[in-house]
Amino acid sequence: MKKRCDWAGTDPDYIRYHDTEWGVPVHDDNKLFEFILLEGAQAGLSWLTILKKREHYRSVFDNFNPEKIACYNDRKISRLLADPGIIRNRKKVESAIANARAFLKIKEKFGTFDAFIWEQAGGKPVRNSWQTVSEIPAETPVSRTMSRNLKQHGFTFMGPVICYAFMQATGMVNDHVVSCYRHHQIPPK
């Protein structure tokens, strides 16, 4: 049996996410935006809750297309807030729209969101060497700086803890514990 990070538990969705996505470097703008939207929706909730709703989010949020989401109006917001398949929090839904607009402005200014966000994280993945999950910080100086910079560009629901979770999810940091089989499998890109 493969040794995994303790947080992966026994839920098949969580195990699949742990084994195939978490900590793998992402350089695709749309995938990065998907994680931004989902991390904002997750604030205050478990990631497993969001993971189980991800396919529905893809459906109702136009496959995380920032150009479409940036144009959402009050009618679309009302439909989203009535949809039990997502987190029905007005601030989180409005944040997704604001973040889509900010995301597009960054792409326009820097060429790609990927170039901008990876520069915030130092330009290359960091492989940490945590022995236990309890050692992993909730935020770091880098995530605090990233949060501040994203907010200056118009992002909301992107505090330092959310930014660090985003960094973990998108492989800017590899926080698999050293005993986890994925720790050394994920190559830095």
Image (spheres, grey):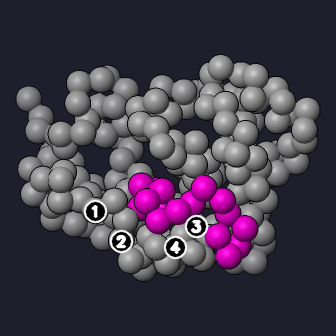
Few, some or many residues within 10 Å of mark 4 (<14, 14–19, 20+): many
Cα distance, mark 3 to mark 1? 24 Å
Disc 1 designates what residue? Answer: 137
Determine the secondary structure under disc 3: helix
The mark nearer the N terminus, 3 or 2, is 3
Q: Name which residue type carries label 3.
A: Asp
Residue 83 badge: none
From the viewer's perspective, is residue 100 above or below residue 76? below
Q: Name which residue type carries label 4.
A: Met
Disc 2 designates what residue? Answer: 140
Disc 3 designates what residue? Answer: 114
Q: Which residues are magenta?
A: 151-166
Few, some or many residues within 10 Å of mark 2 (<14, 14–19, 20+): some
Cα distance, mark 2 to mark 4? 10 Å
Disc 4 designates what residue? Answer: 146
Disc nearest the viewer among 4 and 1: 1
